[in-house]
Image (cartoon, rainbow, N blue to C red):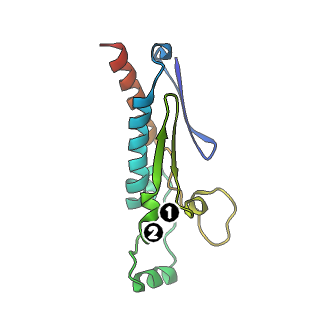
Amino acid sequence: MLKLTWSIEGEVQLARRLRIVAGEIKDWTPAFQEASDRLKEIFSTEVFSTQGAIIGESWQPLKPKYLAQKVRSGFPADTLVKTGRMQRSFFNEVHPDYAVIGNNSPYFKYHQSKEPRSKIPRRIMMKLGNPQKEIVVKVFHTYWYKKTHK
């Protein structure tokens, strides 16, 4: 059996035992690549366009005063989008037995963090909701099936 585990901020987001014989495949790089590419795309586009709703974490709206100031300065009214840098800063790193998805924008951590806050509300961008979990499981199962049923 293959144990598939995905964690975000050290919290297990997905833990499933797939009923497949994992010993037959030593290198899962293509599955990790596809799954992490798809998640990176979701985190950098759909999470922003739905303001977190697609991962079950709807963001607090911008405060009216800040929103007015932002628009007056010529920036988009979108939450968490000023220059687009944070949206473009998602990355993935793939290995035969794991993948890392992250964001190297310096201010990403302040929005994603579970730390207590006094000014900036928590606006989660990376989380696995049920639809995202289903994508990951399907990618791994499909990869296994193609490799073992040639």
2 relative position to 73: left or right: right
Asked if residue 137 can be seen in this view, the reply is: no
User: How far across and down, in percent of the image, does residue 35 sit?
Assistant: 41, 37
How busy is the neighbourhood of tag 2: few (under 14 within 10 Å), some, or many (20 plus)? some
Checking the image for residue 79, the label placed there is: 2
CB under 8 Å between callouts 1 and 2? Answer: yes
User: How far across and down, in percent of the image, does residue 120 sit?
Assistant: 60, 69
The span from disc 1 to disc 2 (Cα, nearest Å) is: 8 Å
User: How far across and down, in percent of the image, does residue 125 sit?
Assistant: 50, 55
Q: Nearer the viewer, residue 80 or 121?
A: 80
Q: Which of labels 1 and 2 is toward the front? A: 2
SS state under label 1: loop
User: How far across and down, in percent of the image, does residue 55 sit?
Assistant: 46, 50
Asked if residue 90 can be seen in this view, the reply is: yes
1 relative position to 46: left or right: right
Q: Quadrant of the C terminus?
A: top left
Q: Label 1 is placed on what type of residue?
A: Trp
Q: Is residue 14 above or below residue 67?
A: above
Q: Is residue 53 above or below residue 128?
A: below
